């Protein structure tokens, strides 16, 4: 098994140097964001403030991906990028030593996870790769992230998962793509993939509802999700079929109904190159942002009508997280950090060779 | 709103074709289609036609020489598939044609299970090209064909009591020949894909600039190198001779594993040459392409030099060294293509745009 040991002194040194919250009261109210990145040849998980300044930097042994966030308790879990086998739980203010979580035997992480609202459990999307099925690993967040159990994700290749407002229903994006770590990141079942959204009761592991796309869209991999103010699940897709086809990449699922897809304007859809890398809502939960790093743009959508509102250009931009009303904080693989809305933007960090390459996801604490 | 404001808004909203100008030959698409794809596809459709004919001959008059003919035609099809398999975009991706021709990697042994199921039950619907086309991709294509011709019970093909097995094999061969012909036609002048590839333009749905064509080629080169190394060589190689499992390699039954991998690596070199990236680079950067070609040539030589049967080679020390060397060279070539060469020709491969994240 790969080592997941973290040099505690390294961490504390970095934390001591970087986690300089000026005043306690102010610090607890400010918005913090989490992102994985490659910085000067090193993989890191970083906590930044809303002005894009580093507050805490945690070294990672390999490339990270996304985070499970426990905002009330100011902590998070950074996951390895698929097919990685490590995760690191840490206090965002660097008050405790980080804790390594190794994937269970025969499992690897997909890079996403959530905490339950009470902070007792952490749930992670994982691959049971010999059986070729997705599972949700259940960890005790009050007891050293001991792995308590797992339940089926009801599909292949679960990627992002979100916990609904009821606090007990987990919605999982089963991307449908089969992989096996012995074969790198090769996709093993493109001809037969069948993505779905699965709603699972985390208390019992029972499936409550499942939604799939039309059969002709079986190669439209559902990968990333966010829940809007109305409680509907929005999802962003990546198309594994021919590039000559340009299916819609953004969808909404309302419980009990079929999933709806929204194409947006033709030139924007074309520019997205069949790839949405991340989705996020604004602070109000009524404006959805979808990033396409291939197209170098962030598109904004009205969650009531599904109407495309506009877009911002951000080359290799992928990380997005809720900022103010109508806005997201966005990061790029070229070091840029933007505060972006559909009709305006502010640059917090210019892209540049010296800057860190921000990874796919940005999470708000 | 005044008209000028609309115009300004339109400008603000205009999307980049691809922000920067790539430094590639304007006719890169034509070069790829004419110098690489056309001969490779013609060879593959010719080889699969011969396989189709050989299978029909074998079924009509089962005999050991006819079986040998069919096996030789199969080997020819595998060798011709090597360079074609590199073109994993456009027509080969549409309708899952790649998987129909070469379902690999087969991590869970689906081919063996399903093919044995068809043979055991004598499923007549699989012995007709039309019926077979509707079935699982694992029942079609080169790996399934290999089991028919080389798997346990294959000798029956030479003796007449393998009539069903032969008809199933003939159906696979007929569909292979048909798919090869379809892909070849789709790459010919006059076909929509050929037009899109060779005439990139703002209103072209697939490629707006020669730089986007170059991006497709670079991605295909990189994907092919990763495919050979990660799915064909490393899983069988394992971390040590004790952990090697030759049966995890493709086409070990017919001992064509290294012929295939070698042909694929030569295909990568051929496509790289056809695209003529070196021609657009200044003298200082031209050696980049040479160093990639050096890696590729040595990798294919190392693979061709493996003498032991594929099933055993992965566990034999001398052969392991050759395979491991090839794997390292392929990885080096892939990094050089994805990083230095891409940067030199002005393509920026995004940190975040990789598949499956």
Image: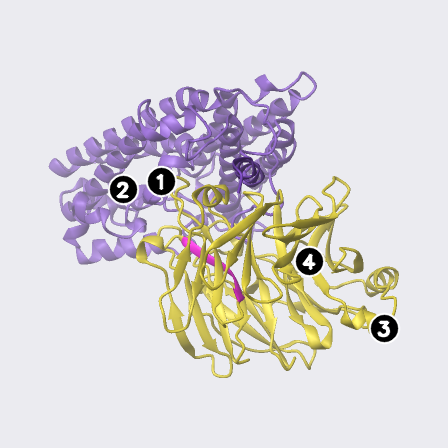
Q: Quadrant of the N terminus of chain A?
A: bottom right
Find residue A326 and report its image quarter.
bottom right
Q: Are marks 4 and 1 in contact (CB under 8 Å)?
A: no
Q: Residues within 10 Å of mark 4 (few under 14, many from 20)?
A: many
Q: Which residue is mark 3?
A: A24
Query: Residue A176: which numbered mark, if any?
Result: none
Q: Which residue is mark 2?
A: B149
- Chain designation of label 3: A
Judged left or right of residue A258, residue A331 is right
Chain B colour? purple
The extreme left residue here reads B60
- Chain designation of label 4: A
Comparing marks 3 and 2, which lies closer to the viewer? Answer: 3
Judged left or right of residue A279, residue A68 is right
Judged left or right of residue A255, residue B243 is right
Q: Are marks 2 and 1 on the same chain?
A: yes
Prevailing secondary structure of the magenta residues: strand
B317 relative to A359, above or below = above
A210 relative to B317, above or below = below
Q: Are marks 3 and 1 in contact (CB under 8 Å)?
A: no
Q: Which residue is mark 1?
A: B254
In this view of the protein, which residue sits in the foreground, A308 or B145? A308
Judged left or right of residue B121, residue B294 is right
Comparing marks 3 and 1, which lies closer to the viewer? Answer: 3
Q: Which residue is mark 4?
A: A35
Q: Are marks 3 and 4 on the same chain?
A: yes
Q: Residue at x 59, y 19 (%)?
A: B280
- What SS does tag 2 mark? helix
Q: Are marks 2 and 1 in contact (CB under 8 Å)?
A: yes
């Amino acid at each position: 098994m790969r080592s997941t040991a973290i040099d505690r002194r390294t961490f504390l040194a970095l934390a001591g140097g970087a986690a300089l919250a000026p005043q306690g009261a102010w610090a607890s109210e400010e918005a913090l964001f989490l992102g994985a990145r490659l910085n000067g040849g090193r993989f890191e998980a970083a906590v930044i403030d809303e002005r894009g300044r580093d507050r805490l930097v945690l070294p990672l042994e390999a490339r990270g991906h996304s985070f499970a966030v426990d905002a009330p308790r100011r902590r998070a879990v950074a996951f390895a990028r698929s097919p990685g086998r490590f995760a690191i739980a840490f206090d965002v203010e660097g008050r405790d030593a980080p804790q390594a979580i190794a994937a269970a035997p025969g499992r690897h992480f997909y890079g996403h996870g959530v905490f339950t609202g009470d902070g007792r459990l952490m749930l992670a999307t994982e691959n049971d790769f010999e059986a070729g099925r997705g599972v949700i690993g259940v960890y005790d967040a009050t007891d050293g992230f001991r792995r308590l159990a797992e339940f089926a994700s009801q599909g292949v290749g679960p990627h992002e998962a979100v916990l609904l407002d009821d606090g007990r229903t987990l919605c999982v994006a089963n991307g449908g793509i089969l992989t096996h770590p012995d074969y790198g990141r090769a996709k093993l079942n493109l001809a037969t993939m069948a993505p779905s959204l699965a709603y699972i009761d985390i208390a019992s592991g029972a499936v409550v509802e499942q939604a799939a796309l039309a059969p002709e869209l079986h190669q439209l991999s559902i990968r990333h999700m966010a829940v809007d103010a109305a409680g509907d699940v929005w999802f962003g897709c990546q198309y594994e079929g021919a590039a000559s086809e340009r299916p819609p990449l953004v969808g909404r699922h309302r419980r009990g109904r079929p999933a709806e897809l929204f194409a947006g304007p033709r030139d924007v859809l074309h520019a997205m190159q069949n790839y949405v890398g991340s989705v996020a809502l604004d602070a109000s939960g009524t404006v959805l942002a979808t990033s396409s790093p291939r197209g170098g743009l962030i598109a904004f959508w009205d969650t009531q009508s599904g109407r495309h509102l506009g877009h911002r250009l951000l080359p290799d931009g992928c990380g997005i997280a809720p900022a103010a009303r109508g806005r997201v904080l966005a990061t790029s693989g070229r070091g840029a950090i933007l505060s972006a809305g559909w009709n305006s933007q502010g640059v917090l960090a210019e892209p540049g060779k010296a800057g860190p390459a921000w990874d796919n996801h940005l999470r708000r604490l | 709103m005044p008209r000028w404001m609309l115009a300004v808004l339109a400008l603000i909203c205009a999307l980049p074709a691809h922000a920067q100008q790539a430094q590639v030959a304007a006719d890169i698409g034509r070069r790829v289609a004419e110098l690489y794809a056309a001969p490779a596809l013609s060879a593959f459709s010719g080889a699969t036609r011969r396989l189709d004919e050989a299978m029909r001959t074998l079924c009509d008059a089962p005999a050991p020489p006819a079986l040998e003919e069919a096996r030789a035609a199969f080997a020819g099809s595998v060798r011709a598939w090597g360079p074609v398999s590199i073109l994993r975009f456009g027509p080969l991706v549409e309708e899952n044609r790649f998987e129909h021709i070469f379902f690999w990697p087969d991590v869970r042994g689906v081919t063996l299970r399903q093919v044995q199921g068809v043979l055991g039950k004598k499923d007549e619907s699989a012995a007709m090209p039309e019926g077979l086309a509707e079935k699982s991709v694992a029942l079609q294509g080169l790996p399934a064909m290999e089991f028919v011709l080389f798997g346990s019970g294959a000798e029956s093909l030479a003796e007449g009591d393998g009539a069903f097995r032969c008809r199933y094999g003939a159906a696979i061969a007929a569909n292979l020949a048909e798919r090869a012909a379809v892909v070849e036609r789709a790459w010919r002048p006059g076909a929509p894909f050929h037009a899109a590839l060779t005439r990139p333009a703002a209103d072209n749905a697939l490629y707006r600039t020669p730089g986007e064509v170059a991006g497709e080629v670079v991605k295909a080169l990189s994907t092919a190198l990763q495919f050979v190394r990660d799915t064909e060589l490393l899983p069988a190689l394992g971390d040590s001779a004790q952990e090697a499992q030759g049966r995890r390699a493709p086409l070990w039954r017919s001992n064509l594993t290294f012929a295939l991998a070698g042909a694929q690596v030569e295909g990568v070199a051929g496509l790289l040459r056809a695209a003529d990236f070196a021609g657009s680079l200044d003298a200082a950067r031209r050696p980049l392409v040479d160093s990639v070609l050096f890696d590729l040539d040595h990798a294919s030589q190392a693979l061709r030099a493996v003498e032991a049967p594929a099933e055993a080679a992965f566990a034999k020390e001398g052969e392991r060294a050759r395979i491991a060397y090839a794997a390292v060279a392929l990885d080096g070539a892939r990094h050089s293509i994805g990083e230095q060469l891409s940067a030199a020709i002005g393509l920026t491969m995004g940190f975040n745009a990789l598949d499956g994240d």
